[in-house]
Image: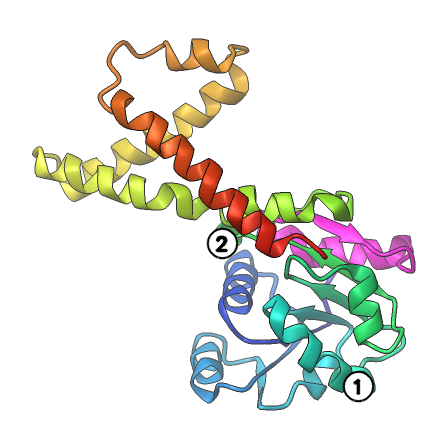
Amino acid sequence: MSIESVGFVGGGRIARIMLEGWRRAGAMPERVVVGDPNAATLDALKAAHPSIETCVGDNCAAAGQSIVFLGLHPAAMGDALPALAGSVEPSSIIVSLAPKVTIAALSSLLGGFDRIARAIPNAPSIVGSGFNPVAFGPALGPADREAVLASLAPLGEAPVVDESALEAYAISAAMGPTYLWFQLYGLREIARSFGLSEEAASVAVERMTRGALDTMSASGLGPADVMDLVAVHPLAAAEPAFLEAYRTSLAAVMERIRPA
């Protein structure tokens, strides 16, 4: 299914990720309109994707497209959405990309418009390796759901989940790469300092990471047995601190993004 018309209310990181993911997949929608108050942000998007249309300080054109992605922080929804209610077409589908604000709350902010879905996208969508769970409001029928899933398909996996699970996915999948990337880049630099070339260090860390994930999913072993496959654990003394940081920091984030 081709994607005819897409709007982005907000031209920040997630719009950049999705547009680049579509471009790499050869799946750029026929028309893309992006609204954002920051002219520099829109200029950067336009430079990377000359075919898109941009509107500085005006989201109304973006809100009038067939599928409208809300790339707004939860705190910005209350001010931005009521102003869009008159611009959304009755046949449009609104897809919020933020945690915390529920489908019911979005509908209320949009003056009762209820053709709404929510998705929690993650950064690997930029290379087609995303994991982007989506939940649908009851007003969206099979064809509507197919259209949303078709728009997400070039970006990676898009499992359909219960709305109540989206915040947990935000913590584990959307924010998850940030818990790992600093370690993987750091390990690559350490490998280079020990004598590997930049290419060899990159390949070693990438293959190790993929293999470690494959072992978790395909070995049939439990966590303790998987971790026992390597005799030497140089970071064993630091592991409790890592896990405690996960528990305390991520619990605090969950409290901030949990729907009221």
At label 1, counting other C-alpha atoms closer than 10 Å, the crowd grade (few under 14, some 14-19, many 20 or more) is: some
Q: Nearer the viewer, residue 199 or 38?
A: 38
- The amino acid type found where label 1 is placed reads Ser
Quadrant of the snapshot with the N terminus: bottom right
Which quarter of the picture shows residue 240? top left
The residue carrying mark 2 is 123
Q: Residue at x 52, y 48 (%)?
A: 252
Q: Where is residue 179 shown, x and y percent of the image?
A: 40, 43
Instruction: Give me the disc on residue 186.
Output: none
Q: Regarding mark 2 in the picture, which secondary structure is present there?
A: helix
The residue carrying mark 1 is 87
Position of 62 with respect to 249 (left or right) is right
Q: Considering only vertical position in the picture, is 132 above or below 117? A: above
Q: Residue at x 16, y 35 (%)?
A: 191
Q: Where is residue 171 shown, x and y percent of the image?
A: 55, 46
Position of 73 with respect to 186 (left or right) is right
Which residues fall within the magenta stretch? 127-155
Q: Where is residue 128 shown, x and y percent of the image?
A: 53, 50
Q: Regarding mark 1 in the picture, which secondary structure is present there?
A: loop
At label 2, counting other C-alpha atoms closer than 10 Å, the crowd grade (few under 14, some 14-19, many 20 or more) is: many
Q: Where is residue 48 shown, x and y percent of the image?
A: 44, 74
